Image (cartoon, rainbow, N blue to C red):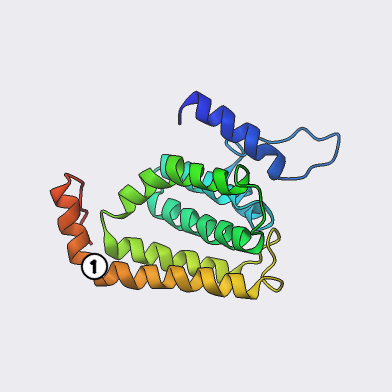
Amino acid sequence: MTGMLRIALTALLAPLLMPLPAQAAPQDPMTMPIEKLEDIAPDQHPSAYFILARRAFEAGKKDAAVRWLYVGQLRWRVYLKANPDLPPDGDPALFASMMETIGRPINEWAGGNVGQWTQSLQAALDWDAEHPNGFTPKAEHKAEYASVRSGLSDFIATLREQRDSIARSRAENSLINRAD
């Protein structure tokens, strides 16, 4: 990650993560132990999952990075649906930016093995189903969750149906295909 991107992400995300007592020094989500970030993520802004995805990817835990990226997408999309009047230069813009800067390299890697990609996507759905969301509570936003989860399930089905054409397209564009 470039120095400027790290500074920008830390400045943007630090206030969103981990409300702490007044005398405690805030922890940098980019350097705190990843296990700590995993533990607190369910109560944080959805950007926490993007940080997890980036850190996992950089640590070589690429399948985990895909899962965290899609947990983050799912929960951020729910939040945006639940709050349609957010200023476009706020959370919607931050989501788009993080999808480009963090999501693009992870998705490019994930597409190299559609079978593993779909497993990671299903793992994201499963993780989300098993964990609360303290930022956008599930009980208060059932319709939004149903819509976004359905969209992700449809995406999994589409990837499975287009598995061969995805591999051909990647080969034509000099992208690596990894074996199942």
Tell me the amino acid under the disc marked 1.
Gln
Image quadrant holding the N terminus, namely: top left
Q: Which x, y percent locates residue 134?
A: 71, 61
Residue labelled with disc 1: 162
Q: Viewed as shown, does residue 34 lie left or right of 118?
A: right
Q: How many marks?
A: 1
Q: Residue at x 58, y 48 (%)?
A: 47
**Dot 1 alpha-carbon crowd within 10 angstroms: few under 14, some 14 to 19, many 20 or more:** few
Q: Which x, y percent locates residue 70?
A: 47, 58
Answer above or below: position of 18 versus 122: above
| Residue furthest right in the image | 22
Q: Which x, y percent locates residue 45?
A: 65, 51
Q: Residue at x 28, y 70 (%)?
A: 160
Image quadrant holding the C terminus, namely: bottom left
Q: Residue at x 35, y 66 (%)?
A: 118
Q: Viewed as shown, does residue 66 lie left or right of 95?
A: left
Out of 161 and 94, give the one closest to the viewer.
94
Out of 92 and 135, give the one closest to the viewer.
92
Q: Quadrant of residue 13?
A: top right
Q: Viewed as shown, does residue 3 lie left or right of 38?
A: left
Q: Viewed as shown, does residue 109 lie left or right of 101?
A: left
Q: Secondary structure at mark 1?
A: loop
Q: Which x, y percent locates residue 48?
A: 59, 48
Answer above or below: position of 120 versus 105: below
